[in-house]
Amino acid sequence: MKDNRGGVFMKKIIVYPFTYEHRELIIYDYLINNFKLIGAIVLNDSDEKSLKNELNGFSVEKITCNFDTYLNECDTVLFLDTENQYVTKEHYMSKLAMAHKANKEILFTNKCAHFSGETYIENAFMLNGKEEKNVPNATIEKYIKNIDIPAIGVMGIGKYCNKLCCELVLYSYFKSKGYNVVYIGSKDYVPLFGGKIFPDFVNDKNFSVTDRIIKLNHYLFELSISEKADIFVLGMPGGIMPLNNKILNNFGEIPFIISNAIRLDIGILCSYYYERLTGEYIESYSNYCKYKLNCDINFINISNSSYRFNLDSQESVLEYLHYKNEMANNVAIENNDQKIWSFNILNEKSKKMMLEKIYNDLTSGVSAF
Amino acid sequence: MSVIFKLIKTPTHFYIYDRSRNAILEIQEDEYSDFNKIEKGLINAEDLKILEKYQSHDFLMENSVEKIEHPCSKSIDHYLGNHLETLILQVTQKCNLRCEYCIYSGNYDNRSHSDLDMDYITAKKAIDLYLTSSNELDELSIGFYGGEPLINIGLVEKCVNYISGKVTGKYITYSLTTNGTLFNDKIVEYLVKNNFSIMISVDGSQKEHDEYRKFQNGKGSFEVIQKNLRKIKKKYPEFYQKITFNSVLNPKNNYGNIKGYFENDELIADSDVFTNVVESVDLTQDVKFTKEFKIINEFDYFKLYLFMLNKLDVEDISKLVLLKRKFIYERYNRIIKKNKLGSTCHHSGPCIPGTRRLFVNVQGNMYPCERVSESSPIMRIGDVNNGFNIPNIENLLNVGRITEDQCKNCWALLHCDQCAQKADGNDHLSKKLKIQHCPKSRKQAFFDLKEICILKEFGCTFER
């Protein structure tokens, strides 16, 4: 099979279950490596309608609730994890059986692999290969190594802040400029785009936070050498801080570990949408990142999503609202004394200006060591 | 210069509620006295030195409110298109009872009984609209309402089948509000099988209940309900535990009897009971409570406070007031945030019409919830054929605009309980009607704030 991207053979892939949390697969389908996405399969026909509306302007023709038809046309089925707790093992198993019967290649992201754990399935693989064999033993060398290549960190206040969109755009941009980019992303399907996921020890509670920071530092150090990296793009899983006394976001533990494992030259904070943003708001987050995460925030991405607390939950359950992308275009920061650059990653003009600014910031400085 | 505040005094302490921060500050007695002079117009706020002390800490700031507009005004479209929480279908307007205070009884202006049932096509259109407009939620909630919904159980079954066939990967809750007289084995089995949440209207013991909840022949409905409840409890004890009861309290009745029934009756003692007070025929008039009602109710509240102060166990508290604790905690948690008030805001009270409990009547007309009047064109927010009437919804959401001048300067702006229902002038939102409710709303707000002050003084942590 020939593909129109340079005549390279590309397998046709469908993903299931597709929800708004996997939107990047539709927005950036052209950045997917080695596969051609032909179908993003949703659970309900009402989901198809609403997601096509929400992602209008992107490759929404691939969104469908028709698993059977697209299964026939594809080579590979990727099963995705979802935050929706009502998508059960049965949902996966029924589609898995169909894919298996149709003799398709089956891929799982890490988090949903447990659904297949009880049964051996031929042709089923993890999307993410493990790459931890070279992790140095941090208990021997308990110090931070200096990693002398630029690093861009993308962090977020919570879910749905378009972190992954920023990561993919940055990764693609610097790659297109000829740089050797090591990209470690915030979601477990980033390998589909050519990125890596963070090694398991980052989440391993058997190690202290200090040990995890040092291990990650050494891991990144080795990676920078082995991959001859010119630049790191690091997407930080999870939110950077609690939203209130009940939504704790793990107190931003993972961003804390990552930002202490490597000095970030550029910090991008992805924020929820607000009708207006004040300098006071920006300053509070900027200070938090500076003093807690050891990182200056230079850029803020205004996402098209906002949250509210479920009205019956006494502020213990979040609900998300995903507005049209254009909503985030005109959010200006009032009294922006911090001179933080704001942008909307889903807006072409705004995205381009952000990329050029970052490129200039990283290339126009004095090179000293 | 205008600083919006309200003074609060307890037997031993003095407080000021600061609207600019939605906060309560404890003050000294002499400060209270000075602020009292401002409140009474005896001195101007700018002449008060003590104000500087608080303003230097960003409290008691000048009134910043320039415009009354609900913060969700610009996102109404989005909420209605993606975030509908609950759909309530009025499957019939028929009822086999003729309760005197029922909103359909003809004693009120807002509704009357008819022989109309909802048809399946209308129900499907309502469900389709709901399913496509709730995509941001993983949990769906569909309620069936009447009249008496069990009269049209066939439609209920069709709706459930339709939804089950269309939805996967979402948690669906079905609920039904019934007078409890029409249960039979087949119906109960169906409700159990489909995991329905049932709310039954019972007003108290036989004496109180039968006084108002009567069959068309004038006979009370209590005995029939009791018989049905016993059968359900025996056959489906787990299902029975989930049944809740709604009681319309009539202050003319013996509250002690009613309370005793709900707390001690073998069929109801372990169940949740929600109470509301019968509405006056003249909806603008307060219902008058008897002295006996007030004494018992206030004593129950007193015990609730003691429970919140860890002086009593939960078993000692009347379940008729226990739920109120949640609302006190919610109010406290809003107060301690000390959010600054901006230049544009709206009083509390209104939900985004249609997004919380979208009510669709038998004809397919849509209303913000089941409590508003179906007879008022102003409350109609669309229909299942043409969708939502956004301009009208925006109008209902921003009901505060009709009292903009009053709201801008009202200390209770953020503790108001008025939604558009209170301004229902049939074909328009009535400023006159709304303002009639303001004193009651402010009185309740003052009580709520003072309640927090006193509980705090006695060491309440406002944590569970």
Image (tube, helix red, strand yellow):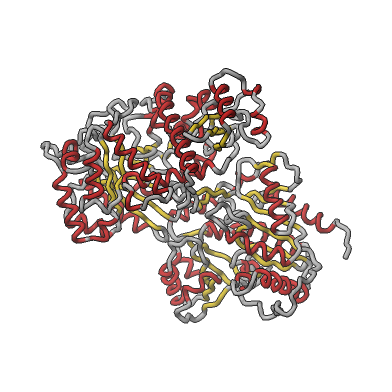
Q: Residue at x 23, y 50 (%)?
A: B264
Where is residue A369? Give x, y as percent. Answer: 88, 65
Where is residue A218? Give x, y as percent. Answer: 73, 74
Q: Residue at x 27, y 42 (%)?
A: B247
Which quadrant is the N terminus of chain B positioned in? Answer: top right
- Is residue B453 rendered to the left or right of residue B263? right
Does B252 sit above or below residue A122? above
Where is residue A343? Give x, y as percent. Answer: 69, 48
Which of the pair B393/B214 is nearer the observer? B214
Instruction: Look at the image and tell me whether residue B118 can be seen.
Output: no
Instruction: Look at the image and tell me whether residue A243 can be seen.
Output: yes
Where is residue B432? Give x, y as percent. Answer: 41, 21
Q: Hey, which residue is sitting farthest front in the picture? A: B12
Which of the pair A86/B45 is nearer the observer? B45
Quadrant in which residue A12 is drawn? bottom right
Which of the pair B79/A67 is nearer the observer? B79
- Is residue B81 rendered to the left or right of residue B385? right
- Is residue B87 rendered to the left or right of residue A338? left
Q: Residue at x 40, y 35 (%)?
A: B381
Looking at the rendered structure, the number of numbered marks drawn on it comes to 0
Q: Residue at x 14, y 47 (%)?
A: B224
Does B319 sit above or below residue B437? below
